[in-house]
Image (spheres, grey):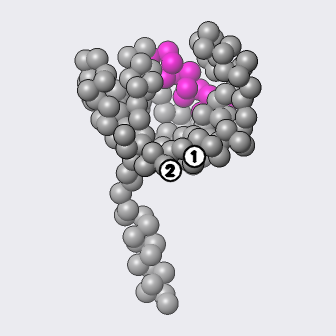
Amino acid sequence: MKSFIILTLIALTTAEWTLKTQDEWLKIREDCNTRFHVPNELIEKTKNDKYPPKEVLANVLCYLKGLEIWNDKDGFLVDRIMIGLENVAKKIENYNAKLLQEGLKSCINQNSEGTTTFDGAQRCFKCFIDNTYLFEALKKTSFYQE
């Protein structure tokens, strides 16, 4: 039994992350929209605001956790985000993986300020939005197989 547990743990820690299927994405989206419902009026308002309000950010953070590109311990997982970016590289004008990766790493917040996970995520999102090239690329990114 101990051998089985050890082998299972090794398999889990060495398993490579892959893009979700479209069905998995739809399930994540449905679950997050149920748990963190955002009224249409707020969604429309967000389209005109530079930074999303907390209600929208909570919904998006739920998506990111479901897609396994964010966790509360490490925050954004750059390698996984890069897989998503590479998945749509043809859609990104002047695609530059090195520049995008550097931009992501500069925004990653290890929550050194000792605040909540949500506040750390909010700082990351603000950094992404303030980096025009990175933000435009992220808007085109897909974390599921198309």
Quadrant location, the C terminus = top left
Asked if residue 128 lies in the magenta stretch, the reply is yes
Name the one closer to the observer, 87 or 1.
87
Kindly indicate the quadrant of the structure image that contains residue 30. top right
Residue 24 is marked as 2
SS for dot 2: helix
Residue indicated by mark 1: 28
Disc 2 versus disc 1: distance between alpha carbons? 6 Å
Residue 20 at x, y = what percent? 43, 49
CB atoms at circles 2 and 1 under 8 Å apart? Answer: yes
**Which residues lie in the magenta part?**
115-131
Which residue is at a point 26% across and 23% down the rendered structure image? 95
Mark 2: which amino acid? Glu
Residue density around tag 1, few if under 14, some if 14–19, many if 20 or more, within 10 Å = some
Is 109 covered by the magenta stretch?
no
Q: Position of residue 94 (x, y in %)?
A: 25, 18
Above or below, comparing residue 74 to residue 95 in the picture: below
User: Given the image, on which type of amino acid does mark 1 rest?
Assistant: Ile
Image location (x, y in percent) of residue 101: 34, 31
